[in-house]
Image (cartoon, rainbow, N blue to C red):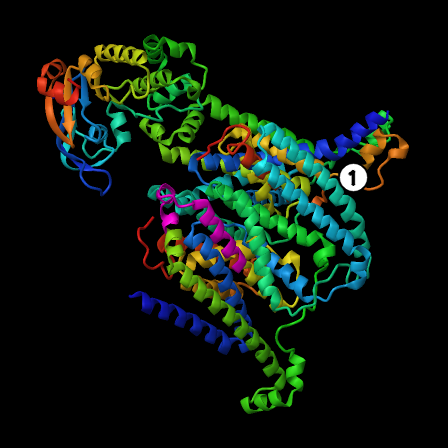
Amino acid sequence: MSYLVGQNMTGGYGTGADILHDCTVGVEKGEIAVIVGPNGAGKSTAMKAVFGMLNLREGSVLIDGEDITSLSPQARVHKGMAFVPQTENVFPSMTVEDNLVMGAFIREDDITDSMEQVYELFPILKEKRAQPAGELSGGQRQQVAVGRALMTQPKVLMLDEPTAGVSPIVMDELFDRIIEVARTGIAILMVEQNAKQALNIADKGYVLVQGRNRFTDTGAALMADPEVRKAFLGG
Amino acid sequence: MDLLNALVVLANFIIVPALAYGSQLALGALGVTLVYGILRFSNFAHGETMSAGAMFAILFMWLFQSWGISIAPLPTVLVALIPAMICMIIYLLVCDRLVYRHYRRQKAKPVIFLVASTGLMFFTNGIIRFIIGPDEQRVADGARFVMKAREFKNMTGLNEGLAIKSSQVITVITAIVIVAALFWFLERTKSGKSMRAYSDNENLALLSGINPDRVVMIAWTLTAVLATIAGTLYGLDKSYKPFTYLQLLLPVFASAIVGGLGSPIGAIAGGFVIAFSEVTITYAFKKFLTYLVPESWAPEGLVQLLSTDYKFAVSFAILVVVLIVMPTGIFKGKSL
Amino acid sequence: MTYQTRVIGAFSLMAAMLLIVGFAQSWSLVLAILNLCLISSIMALGLNMQWGYAGLFNAGVMGFAALGGAAAVIVSVPPVQEAWAAGGGGIMLALIICAATALLVALVYFRLKASDTIRFATITAILVVGFIFYRMLLDPSVDAIEAVEPAKTGFLGGLGMPIIFSWLVGGLFAAGIAWVIGKVALGLRSDYFAIATLGISEIIVAVLKNEDWLTRGVKNVNGLPRPVPYEIEVQQSPFYQGIAESLGVTVVEFSSLFVKLCYSALFLIVLLIIFYLSQKALNAPWGRMMRAIRDNETAANAMGKHVTGRHLQVFILGSAVIGIAGAMLTTLDGQFTPTSYQPLRFTFLVWVMVIVGGSGNNLGSILGGFFIWFFWIEAEPIGLWMMEFITSGMAADNALRLHLIESAPHMRLIMMGVILLLVLRFSARGILPEQNRQSAG
């Protein structure tokens, strides 16, 4: 059993039709798990389901063996989960530093160490610490978003398409940082549009199609699977 | 010498009154902008909130006066501000609990909040008339002037006097202190930052573990404090009439929007822009010009752009121009 | 409970309450309330078009009602010849300059192809020059007009036509102003629109209070001609004396009731016409589209509907109806008093009517107009009765008791607030909910 797992999840938004059907995703501490698949496959939905942002009719979400299916997203933050939305993931009028401070809102202890770690991970943020986050470039803003999420000292970091809309160079840079974060022992679950690059760094990969698990294996194995390559990775 | 006289005229009739009025508007607009930033609706009841705050201040002032408490030369009402604020904080929190919270949970559209605030406007207005009556009340006691026109003339030897009412000085000083405290809170404390974060990006604030109920509570508390002070200062400066506050709603909203809804700095800037425009455009410049131009050119008429009764038109015109030219206001507020 | 029984029940209850007032207080009072109920219903119908059909928050009902009132003066009062001779020409010229300036500004704003800086500089220049000429012409004329018998006239007077025409003219005035406001403010966000309309209405009332040459300002215009007979005429007519006798009431009492009934009949006719047209419009494709836009503006926009254009139409129509009601109100009062236009009474009370009656339902708006006006008037006796009941244990000269009894009239505001909040919370769709609504927003 993985550290964080959403098992057999079935459900959709509000009272609408089911988007997920018996879908399972999970991630181990210190590992990177990637959810890929065609457009409309329910990748982001699966992620949001794990974070408690939609109603599950069936299935459960467990963290470290504890059932958290009925907890609100806010309560899951206290359980050590952090979520980086795809868009609108910074406080635009606040400085970079204040964004990080807000990330650590629930913490009562000293946060200077965590902040130093984030600045070490993303040196550019230290340079721009006094600038409003809304004035930064797309890639820098993603760094702020990830940094903010790390400030809660999460055990699981969830990223919804962190590289959407950034240049390939910035994307590689971001992936490198994400690997570094995973090495510190944090479990990383992310949804990616750039399937190839993402599976390259993934310990585990989930290929979803129409809300169902189609292929599940290690990143490398999926990359090697001719069927996956043909259907989802463009040959 | 003529130039100096002209400047004194300007200071006496435009700069000093507009500074005081602008401070009152700024404090009022800060309340509107806070509610907008956190609860995301335009609070039509804000004028009445200011009025109710002033009413409580007057009631406590009477109580203190009957006890013989006095801080002369300062007006007694300043002491009464503190219990009045506490009453208003309780009042607004109760209103939020009974009215707004329901719609917040339902995630109702902003316009539903707007209608609800209209209901509270009626209710509050009725309560005020019920308790203190619709008549005019005098708020000021203590010294009336910091500087009288004659003293100024004797002191400087100029023809023109500069009168500064103590209420004007108190208004400006109080406004500076309150605004400084507010900004310290918003910029330096964790709670204040969490309010800005919530205003900036509600979802992300929730993801960061910021408790929305607490943010809303702080917002109403600050609004109560600001509205009580703004309402009382306005009453102190002009005298308290319950129905004038409904008319104050327009310039207050105009200030908040001109500055950029949701932006505290904008609210302050907007307050002074509106106040100075209103006073300047409705001021008769005859005396001022008479000092400046050769005698034969002296104007016959009052050289008043608009009669003072049209001061609404001024705030409104500025509002419309700002909305057309820069819809998010001077200091980018929220556009949607 | 089906919709039909609900409608019948609600209106029967309303009738019963009016009857109770008739028996308990007086029939003259019932008719007085009824007449204002009818006018309120028309105002509510107008606002319902804007809010109920289209979701526009018009916070400027007061302004349109006041325009209607001004129309009553301008249409019905005989012209003051001396005043026209003294300054009529100047005023007209000034108004032409005003219009020309506005036209030029609009032309430059919409047509001039140049950078924003140049456009706004040109506009400012036009405004400044226009304003100077306007004031140069206006000021002396105004002084001259206001000098003509200031105690009695001091204004230009009107056209001296039957006052009933003013109902139409009031609608046209309101429609014209609504067009201008709509052009500028529609398309803004909903709360900006609300504040813009609030501002305009304050300005309209400020103009009516201060432009003495137009409607005598705060000096009021009294004794407007009536569209119905005067009591004294009724009392002197042998025909009516006979009817009064056969009914067993004094002729004075009969005349007062008869005159009020005449007004009721006129108002009822207008109400029925407007109600019929509103119903037709609401159920026509036009109304369906309007509601579709209200329920999902984005989708309607995407389907190529011109949202702002539709909103402009409905805003103008609704405002015109409010203007008509405003003219009717001034006709009923027989005098025009600009100071009586208070936003609580004229804007927000109408809002309470529409929301309590049922947003989007014309019948609901009529019912809301009746209910709310009834309680607005009867809140005072009810409040007084309540206060006397509450304080009945206290000594007659107890200060609290005296204060409470004295403050009873203000109960009506508290009551309106509570009614609005309760309906909004527990029955958000009002007493008579909108029918055939597609989706619940």
* Residue B73 visible to the viewer: no
Taken as a whole, is the magenta stretch helix, strand or loop? helix
Q: Is residue A206 visible?
A: yes
Quadrant of the image containing the N terminus of chain B: top right
Q: In this figure, which residue is indicated by the disc labeled 1?
A: B303
With respect to residue C74, does A102 lie above or below?
above
Residue A116 position, x and y percent, is: 35, 10
x, y percentage for residue C420? Answer: 44, 55
Residue A110, position as x, y percentages in the image? 35, 15
Q: Which residues fall within the magenta stretch?
A: C292-321
In the rendered structure, does residue A118 fall within the stretch colored magenta?
no
The vertical placement of B133 against A234, above or below, is below
Corner quadrant of residue A81: top left
Q: Is residue A223 left or right of residue A165?
A: left
Q: Is residue B120 left or right of residue A123?
A: right
In the image: residue A91, left or right of residue A49: right
Report the residue at 26% width, 19% height from top. Answer: A154
Residue A90 position (above or below residue C2): above
Q: In the image shown, does C419 or C59 lie closer to the viewer?
A: C59
Mark 1 secondary-structure assignment: loop
**Is residue C300 a member of the stretch shown in magenta?**
yes
Chain for disc number 1: B
Q: Position of residue B17 (x, y in %)?
A: 70, 35
For the point 18% across and 23% down, which residue is it?
A: A35
